[in-house]
Amino acid sequence: MSCLLLQDKFPDFKAETTKGELSIHEYFGTSWGILLSHPGDFTPVCTTELARMVKLFSEFEKRNVKLIAISLDSKDNSLKWIKDINTFGGYDPNAPLPYPIIADEDRSIAVKLGMVRPGAVSTPGLPLTARHVFVVDPKKILRLVLIYPASTGRYFPEIFRAIDSLQLTEKYGVSTEADWKPNGRVVVPEGFPPEKAAELFPDGVKIEQFPSGKTYLQFGEMRKCQNKIITS
Ligand code: BEZ
């Protein structure tokens, strides 16, 4: 079984989806990408998640993130399931979803991504370990993995918070602290270039005082415009 680690190249694969065949690298293109896996069609928690993903689709778009789902089921089933998903979300049952669902009926993609054990490929019933979140950057590097058991639906505000952190820290070379939220103070690494610090942190950088006398934790409030951190 392949074990994908952060910073690995996300594997490319061809897949049959509810919107036709695609290659995952081509689908993500030059955007960030997110793949959310689902144990099977017509399952209760997955139905709530996929309806939520319709509602939140524009939030992914705002962040330049291409969204795709994968279900370990057939394309035929997934196409029928879409009506239930739309109905649960309060949408037109016959409307297409704004994102594709990969039909991974033979579980080969799930095995490739390390979501199920190869031995579980032909186990009848639903594999219970396949509620994964993979976030991939525009260079197709794996940047975040979250794994939930089938019984626990995902918390989308945390997924957006993590994407916001990834994109902010990538752009400015900073880090985000425990419970950070967008527009919160950021962690400034030691050795951060002073000219860049002066530009990004108009109120300066605050060094935490520790018994050790070490200066490894410092915070900065990023320059804001109309209450939003300037990101471009
Ligand atoms: C669910 O989506 O509710 C679910 C899927 C697989 C196993 C258990 C629950």
Image: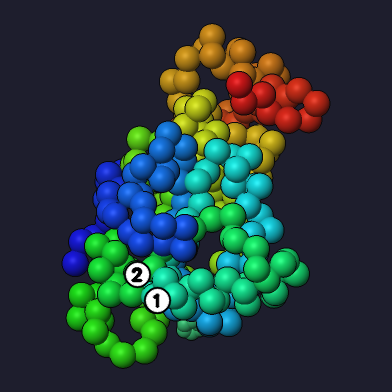
Q: Is residue 88 above or below residue 221?
A: below
Residue that badge 1 annotates: 73
200, 6: nearer the viewer: 6
Where's the N terminus, which quadrant?
bottom left
Residue type, label 1: Asp
Helix, strand or loop for disc 2? loop
The answer to whether residue 34 is left or right of residue 104 is: right
Residue at position x 47%, y 51% from top?
34
Name the spot of residue 42 as percent of width and height, x first: 53, 82
Quarter residue 134 falls in: bottom left
Residue that badge 2 annotates: 104
Can residue 133 be seen here? The reply is: no
Q: Could you give the CA–CA distance between mark 2 and mark 1, rounded to whole angstroms?
A: 6 Å
Name the spot of residue 213 as percent of width and height, x first: 48, 32
Farthest residue in the bottom direction?
Answer: 124
Residue at position x 47%, y 37% from top?
31
Helix, strand or loop for disc 1? loop
**Contact (Cβ within 8 Å) of mark 2 with mark 1:** yes
Scheme by which the image is coloured: rainbow
